[in-house]
Amino acid sequence: MKIGELARRAQVPIDTVRYYEREGLIPLPVRRASGYRDYLDSDVDRLRFMRRAKALGFTLQEIRELLGLTAMASGDMAALHARAQAKLRDVEDRIQSLTRIRDALQGLVTACPGHGSLDRCPILAALSEDSA
């Protein structure tokens, strides 16, 4: 299949397919005599896997590692489980950090009347104070 069909079936942009090729995340396709790339159904599966992993927050390097683990069909799932568990911890840490940021911003927005002189703005005062 040509690159456009591959991209459509995998639900990714054509540029993503080309980028993943350059990065070695999908194998280089065979070229037809016409010069067109000829992709396989397994390339669709691989791109879908990568799209889903990316949606779960895995980086391209982590996806590369996941693909390496999945290539060992007879291997144990422990390594894959450990990677998913580590990603979950990372997401939970980011959620805690974002919650702290949200709470701080919420406090500043609540404290600010939204009108009046800037020299009495609690948001500006909080951003300008020397916390060291």
Image: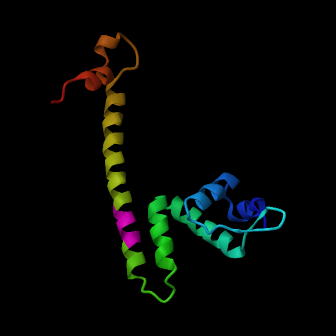
Examine the structure image and report whether residue 106 is included in the region drawn in magenta.
no
Q: Which residues are magenta?
A: 83-89
Quadrant hosting residue 14 = bottom right
Name the outermost residue toward the front.
33
Of residues 21 and 60, the one nearer the viewer is 21
Q: Residue at image x 79%, y 62%?
A: 36
Of 104 and 28, which appears nearest the observer?
28
Residue at image position (67%, 75%) is 42
Residue drawn at (26%, 25%) of the image: 126
**Quadrant in the rendering for residue 4:** bottom right
Q: Quadrant of the N terminus?
A: bottom right
* Magenta portion: prevailing SS class: helix
- 69 with respect to 14 (left or right): left
From this view, report whether residue 27 is shown above or below residue 73: above
- Which quarter of the figure is the C terminus placed in? top left
Q: Residue at x 58, y 69 (%)?
A: 49
Q: Position of residue 91 (x, y in %)?
A: 38, 58
State the image coordinates of residue 50 (x, y, percent, origin top left).
56, 65
Evaluate whether residue 57 shows in this view: no
* Residue 62: % across, % down: 44, 64
Q: Estimate the x, y position of residue 98 in percent, counting from the top left.
A: 36, 46
Q: Is residue 84 magenta?
A: yes
Horizontally, is 27 left or right of 5 in the view?
Answer: left
